């Protein structure tokens, strides 16, 4: 996973390289106490699509992607029936068919082009649930809104990054241990 990725003139994001669903959620982050939205930046959405190798005209995929991002954040932070309904509404917009040709499996998406990237991101979340759902985690910093898929060997990762939130937590613990008591 790369930390602080930058493409072209795009705003620096604190965490990149996560699976598609989580990377979409992570297009919003907190910086100096305020929420930043990559899709509000000039060419931010276009460059994110290119980074993810997703087809689509930013003018037509933006609303579906924002809707998918909102649904994914909700299912991650407030799981339940309402959150599942939001996810299912996006999944209902498309289907995946398989064909076999010369012993090779081919996938075909039956979905409107404007919804394809959003549908793929939500479908990727389902893939993560099928693999190891307990590895989908929020950053351990309560002020951070980023999520990650823990690929560490022992599955104990707590921070979106050690360069950011993990380093700050480590420094705070060090300060608490070594501060001089007053009075």
Image: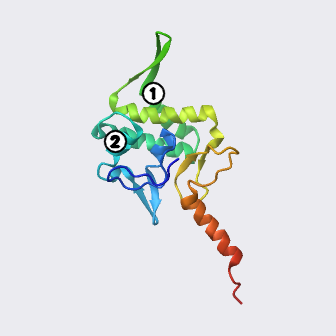
Q: Identify which residue is drawn at 65% across, 74% down.
A: 175
> Mark 1 touching mark 2, by CB under 8 A?
no
Q: Position of residue 4 (x, y in %)?
A: 46, 55
Q: Earlier in the sequence, mark 1 or mark 2?
A: 2
Q: Please name whichever residue, 93 or 39, is drawn nearer the observer in this view of the structure.
A: 39
Disc 2 designates what residue?
Answer: 62
Q: Identify which residue is drawn at 48% across, 14% down.
A: 104
Residue 143 visible in the current orientation: no
Q: Residues within 10 Å of mark 2 (few under 14, many from 20)?
A: some
Q: Residues within 10 Å of mark 1 (few under 14, many from 20)?
A: few
Residue at the limit of the structure toward the bottom, as seen here: 183
The residues tagged by marks 1 and 2 sit, at their Cα atoms, a distance apart of: 18 Å
Q: Please name whichever residue, 63 or 32, is drawn nearer the observer in this view of the structure.
A: 32
Q: Is residue 158 left or right of residue 65?
A: right
Disc 1 designates what residue?
Answer: 92
Q: Position of residue 62 (x, y in %)?
A: 34, 41
* Color encoding of the figure: rainbow
Q: Identify which residue is drawn at 54% across, 49% down.
A: 147
Residue 82 visible in the current orientation: yes
Residue at the limit of the structure toward the top, as seen here: 102
What secondary structure is found at the residue carrying circle 2?
A: helix
Quadrant housing residue 94: top left
């Amino acid at each position: 996973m790369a930390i602080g990725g930058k493409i072209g003139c795009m705003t620096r994001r604190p965490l990149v390289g996560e699976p598609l669903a989580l990377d979409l959620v992570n297009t919003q982050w907190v910086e100096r106490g305020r929420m930043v939205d990559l899709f509000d930046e000039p060419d931010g959405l276009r460059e994110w699509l290119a980074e993810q190798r997703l087809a689509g005209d930013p003018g037509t995929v933006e609303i579906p992607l924002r809707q998918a991002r909102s649904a994914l954040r909700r299912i991650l932070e407030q799981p339940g029936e309402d959150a599942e309904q939001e996810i299912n509404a996006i999944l209902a917009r498309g289907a995946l068919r398989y064909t076999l040709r010369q012993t090779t499996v081919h996938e075909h998406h039956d979905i409107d082009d404007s919804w394809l990237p959003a549908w793929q991101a939500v479908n990727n979340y389902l893939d993560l649930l099928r693999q190891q759902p307990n590895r989908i985690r929020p950053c351990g910093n309560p002020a951070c809104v980023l999520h990650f898929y823990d690929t560490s060997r022992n599955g104990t990762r707590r921070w979106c990054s050690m360069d950011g939130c993990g380093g700050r937590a480590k420094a705070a613990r060090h300060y608490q241990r070594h501060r001089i008591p007053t009075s």
